[in-house]
Amino acid sequence: MGEQAQVSRPTLGDVEQILAALAQEGYIADREIATAIYLSIELHKPLLVEGAAGVGKTEIAKVMARALGTDLIRLQCYEGLDVNTALYEWNYQKQMLRIRLEEGSGRSPEEKEQTIFSEPFLLRRPLLQAITHPKAPVLLVDEIDRVDEEFEAFLLELLSDWQITIPEIGTIRAQHVPYVVLTSNRTRELSDALRRRCLYLWIDYPSFEKELAIVLRKVPGISRQLAEQIAAFLHAVRALDLQKVPGVAETLDWSAALMRLHRDHLDREAVERTLGCLFKHHEDQKVARGPWLDRALAVIADAQRDGQSLQAALDRLERLARG
Amino acid sequence: MRPEFGSLTEHVVEFSRRLRAHGVLCGPAETADALRALRAVNLLDREAFRLALRTTLPHRREDLAVFDALFESYWRAWRAPEPQAEDTKPEPQAAEGASLGSPSVRRWGREDPEGEQEVPGYSPLEVLSRKDFSSFREDELDRIARLVVAIARRIATRWSRRRRRARRSHLLDMRRTLRLHLRWGGAFPELAFQRRKIRKHRVVLLCDVSGSMDVYSRFLIQFVYALQDALGRVESFVFSTSLTRVTEELRSRSLRRALDRLSQTVPNWSGGTKIGTSLRQFLDRYGGLLDRHTVVVIVSDGWDTGEVEVLRRAMQEIRARAARVIWLNPLLGSPGYQPLTRGMQAALPYVHVFASAHNAESLRELEQALAQGRSRGSGRREAR
């Protein structure tokens, strides 16, 4: 283990290059996102990404890893996640076997103990993997809001020192400081200390233009007309009073479903048949089926036919959805 | 190469200071990051400049709106660096309401950032009335306080996933077992176990002190106080037309002193009630207190003079974000009472436990209800 945690890492170049690299990876980003990624790399600081479910928070880390040509190590958080699952665990089966093998070898218990509590018997969990990786990886700590305060404090310490201590082995320092991306769905407020450790990025639902670009890019063979209708419809849907607002993932599922049904435009029947792609609550589906649907579809069709101002049409849709 | 950089640094420091004055979590460390970030971006590009500051200075979504508003007013004068403009310090604009996002931002715009902080929720327009609490009887208080402490402990305790060594339980501590195993040379003479450690819930107490709750307010305040005293992690709020956080006020050792202080600091004690608005205020300002380990206790009769829909949505959100929602309604104790007020009707679907809190006896019943709730809850957790 090196004496100094080294921070010499490859970078992605400036913001424009990051935008290009992200686009190449199929991720439609805006400058806000690209700047956050850029600064996170330049300032060597973890990036905290917040936003509603399905806006592409996790994607950022995946794309970052691919663009940097490095590995992605993912720690999926959940309630009750503990150090054994996140950091390391001893391989008990292997230890047992070794004990059996050494029976009658005449070695003292102390010597045996030293053997079985050494690195070959260690199971590396994501955090230890990230620290000992031969090349600076991207470490994704997904849904950090699900762990409890104690684990959060532990993580904060790790992000500061980049070293961990295993009682039986000693202190392990990071050879290469990983790129860190933390995501949160805001089910719990994170501590101020953790926030202040990180750069901050809030990802909102995409604008009409961005969503259109995403659909065109991610749904092969879709016509521009249908893609525009889908993006406009989603713009309206997100103004509805829903339990679960559909994210980009839902938009893409829905687009794919419409393509499967060979639809080239939206109408009530098409929407009703594919409702399950967008709305995951029974109540939400009822809301979506309501009388506003016909009027919204009419507004979209009119806007496209007459080529009227896009912004005006989107505003009308929003008012319609708000009732 | 950037002759104006010195003055820019000063402006960034001043800008951070202003963000801080407006409640944004932002100190010298953030300012240093911002300055480092500015060295890494193209300063001639105003958008790059803005995004560099926006990524480094604020740390939460709520602060982004404050940042955007302040950025516009503070850096309005700042364009791409021009040699002659370098020493003119941009004057922060006294914000005109229209250009700024939220009402709170607008309010800040009018205030001197260095000025006295007002009591949250205080407004001279609201009816202010203060109550004398001297009528509390000491012996009565002690008795009820003891009971309430028992109830409070029950609310606030749950089994946690954190483990602790213990003699008997169902989780093997493999690390210790192996060590014992080694020591005894091969057999398993003893298994080491782990036990769940007891962890406490956070309790958020929202207490109606409006006119319609007048009769009960002294009883309620005992409840608030006892919860506060029994546990470290209770956040207490009182509300009528607006919400006031009283956690600090109730922290003092003597209840009598705490009550005196409260009656002086809480505005509109026994005024009208806007339950929905108050709960919304709670969510907006203190929503971060809610998580899956939080028990929310609302004490109110449900007489809401505000919009029912506001109340319904606030309750829906609280229900979605907290572990348990308990509504204590003192009127439930009166014979023949039906929870028919519109506010109560709107709130009920989002309440786990609906109980009365009109006397000590009813609190005892509540204690039992909570005990049942807990054992069910922990059973489910342990099954996973």
Image (cartoon, rainbow, N blue to C red):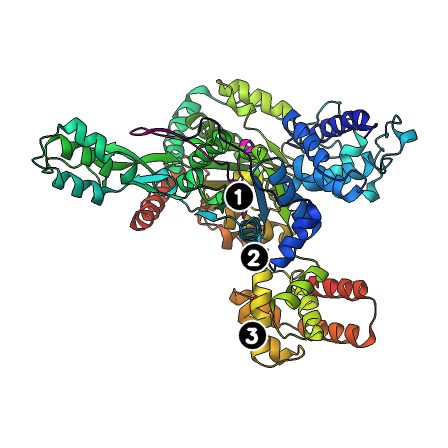
Of pointers 2 and 1, the one earlier in the residue sequence: 2
The answer to whether residue B181 is above or below residue B302 is above
Of pointers 3 and 2, the one earlier in the residue sequence: 2
Which quarter of the rendered picture does the N terminus of chain B lie within? top right
Q: Residue furthest left?
A: A104
Residue B155 image position (x, y, % from top left): 40, 37
Left-right relation of B296 to A14? left
Left-right relation of A271 to B198? right
Camera sees residue A19: yes
Tell me what residue is drawn at x 25 percent, y 34 percent: A117
| Magenta stretch in the rendered image | A165-193
How many residues crowd around disc 2 within 10 Å: few (fewer than 14), some, or many (20 or more)? Answer: some
Which amino acid type is shown beneath numbered disc 3?
Ala
Looking at the rendered structure, which numbered label has been put on residue A182?
Answer: 1
The answer to whether residue A156 is above or below residue B45 is above
Of A288 and A11, which appears nearest the observer?
A11
Residue A282 image position (x, y, % from top left): 52, 67
Q: Quadrant of residue A230?
A: bottom right
Local SS, label 3:
helix
Task: State how many labels appear.
Answer: 3
Looking at the rendered structure, which numbered label has been put on residue A54?
Answer: 2
- Chain of the residue where label 1 is placed in the rendered structure: A
- Tell if the residue under mark 2 belongs to the same chain as the one under mark 1: yes
Mark 3 → mark 2, Cα distance in angstroms: 18 Å
Which amino acid type is shown beneath numbered disc 2?
Gly
Which residue in the protein does label 3 denote? A257
Q: Are marks 3 and 1 in contact (CB under 8 Å)?
A: no
Of pointers 3 and 1, the one earlier in the residue sequence: 1
Which amino acid type is shown beneath numbered disc 1?
Leu
Residue B264 counted in the magenta span: no
Left-right relation of A208 to A73? right
Local SS, label 1:
strand
